[in-house]
Amino acid sequence: MTTWEGLLFGIGFVTQPEVLIYCVLGVVLGTFVGVLPGIGAMAAISLLLPITYYVTPEAALIMLAGVYYGAQYGGAVASILLRLPGTPQSAVTTLDGYPMAQSGRAGVALFTAMASSFVGSVIGILVLVMLAGWLSRAATAFGAADYAAMMILGLVAASTIGTARPAKGFAMVTLGLLLGCIGTDVNSGAQRFTFGQTELLDGINLVALAMGLFGVAEVIANVRNPDRQSVAERIGLRRLMPRRDDLRRMAFPMLRGSALGSFFGALPGTGSTLSSFLSYSMERRIARQPERFGKGAVEGVAGPESANNSAAITAFAPTLTLGIPGDPIMALMLGALVIHGIQPGPMMLEARPEMFWGLVASFGIGNLLLLILNLPLIGIWVAMLRIPFNYLYPAILVFLCLGVYSVRGLTFDIVAVAGIGLAGYLLAIAKFSPALLLLGFVLGPLIETNLRRAFLISRGDPMVFLERPIAAGFVVATVVLLLLPLWQAWRRRSAHELQ
Amino acid sequence: MQRDWPDILGGLILTAIGVGAALWAALHYDIGTLRRMGPGFFPVVLGAGLFVLGLVIALPALGRACTAPKVEPWTLLAVLAAIVIFALGLSRLGLAGTTAVTVLVATLPAPHKGWVWRVLLAAAITVLTVLVFSIGLRMTLPLWPRLS
């Protein structure tokens, strides 16, 4: 199937009413949770995982993806109007979006965010289509050693890049890998760490883990958080349309942000948060008047917002074509597919074209819907910010319990959610990343299987990771990433001694 | 000086988990060789790694100051209790009963005072839950408490 045939096929698939409704549902729900600070895309996707049992895998993935990129749109709304990043990806948007809103240009800031998100997504889709074809061809050359090396690179990248304390990131990834060992070992059939509990034979339930770590922990953290109480400020939205010089200023940052986001989104372990931060610092560095940044520069909204949206889209390329999720949200998406018995990989493009092309087309249609829906609906999103959290969180808890129960019909899983929620809350306040734990958990069985296979094929010779060019490339990149924090620490120390 | 307790305790707990997992796996599961890894190989390696990482986190934190994070013990307790009550109540109190009780327990730590809104909220969420899960998604669950 050529790209054009594929896209047309995908559009035909998504515009079927029974698929389109899930796309709409996903983007609206995503915007909703994105606007609400404290409940992120991770929590929303975990909450929705059980519902995906009731729909086809294609519709499920389209809906979950809609939540993901819809949340990016919503996150920008809260960032601009309240200086509360609704999602981590939109945290940078507060830097210039909020000052714009304070100087009476909230409407223009929102318009900029929406338009940039849309441009970023469209460019992301183009890159995804090109990359996916190339990656799925390249994937036929991938052996077990290459897969294992790439996943290890992803884990190392996720725990070192953008974190202040890499050791804590590594520890969370390792703990996640260890938790992934629980249950029946696929290679030998041995029961590991089950302690005689039949409920643990299939391992820890992904839905329970995700809901506990994100849903429950976020609820506990926000119940008495003064920032999360209702917002009474009046927000003027008189003028939405930007002036001509605003348009001129935002055009190039959008394109640069999209390029940056498309690149970093496709790399394992970096993700959209990093690319929005990078885009902001790049725009400030190349601006003619850097002093305007932080005081309401349109470029400071346009760049990061297009970067995080294009990254959100291209992040699907390794997930769908290689079956390797680059960030924790992609790990949840992969988990959703595995729940349906689908193992994403190079064969999926051929075997389930409606999955890949349907998803790609749904990105286009979903983003168009977001653009059309959100500008007139901004008033409603703002009104929603006034719902007190008191009324929301008990409902979230009940839905979460029923959701996890519906997966296997075991009350054991609900009790497990309470335990995991406790752990997730403590991890969050001690600043250990629960997202990295989840990434390790999902990748654990994949890494173990590929490592064992690689060593079996090479007869126990570790040189296989250096002899194969693909694996060797990943190993070199991993070593560089590992040495980077050490080098930085050493440089900081020597700079310190010089003073 | 306020010590960096989150990192000290967190690191030590991770170290303990690492040691425990590695020892348990080494004693109970076949480790095998690098060429033919047994089910114990991966857990032992990971446990050892976690042991080292825990120490790397905890030891430097011993001499470091840090502002203590705020823990909300009552919120934590009420939310977790609500979830456990839901789990235990589902088969005994029925969907409607357990939802109402769970909501009432969950709202205990809410900063908004008074009980009228709590009862109204419990009623509203119960109706919504029954509509969505029992009637909409057709989950087979008892609705009302079993009287026997």
Image (cartoon, coloured by chain):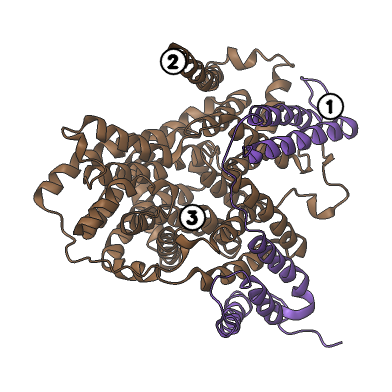
Point 57% across, 67% down: residue: A396
Q: Earlier in the sequence, mark 3 or mark 2?
A: 3
Residue B76 versus residue A96 in the image, above or below? below
Q: Position of residue B25 (x, y in %)?
A: 84, 33
- The disc label shown at residue A495, or none: 2
Marks 3,1: beta carbons within 8 A: no
Q: What is the drawing colour of chain B?
A: purple
Q: Give the number of marks.
A: 3
Q: Mark 1 Cα within 10 Å, few/some/many (few <14, many 20+)?
A: some
Residue A144 percent across, percent down from the top left? 63, 26
The chain carrying label 1 is B
Q: Is residue B41 above or below residue A242?
A: above
Location of residue B55 (image quadrant): top right
| Mark carried by residue B31 | 1
Farthest-out residue, left: A244
Mark 3 and mark 1 on one chain: no
Q: Amino acid at mark 2?
A: Ala
Foreground mark, 3 or 2, reads 2
Q: Quadrant of residue A291?
A: top left
In front of the other: A61 or A421: A421
In the rendered picture, chain A carries what hue? brown
- Tag 3, which chain? A
Residue type at mark 1 is Ile
Q: Is residue A75 left or right of residue A350?
A: left
Q: Which amino acid type corresponds to the residue marked 3 in the rendered image?
A: Gly
Label 1 SS: loop
Q: Is residue A211 visible?
A: yes
Q: Which residue is mark 3?
A: A40
Q: Nearer the viewer, residue A130 or B75?
A: B75
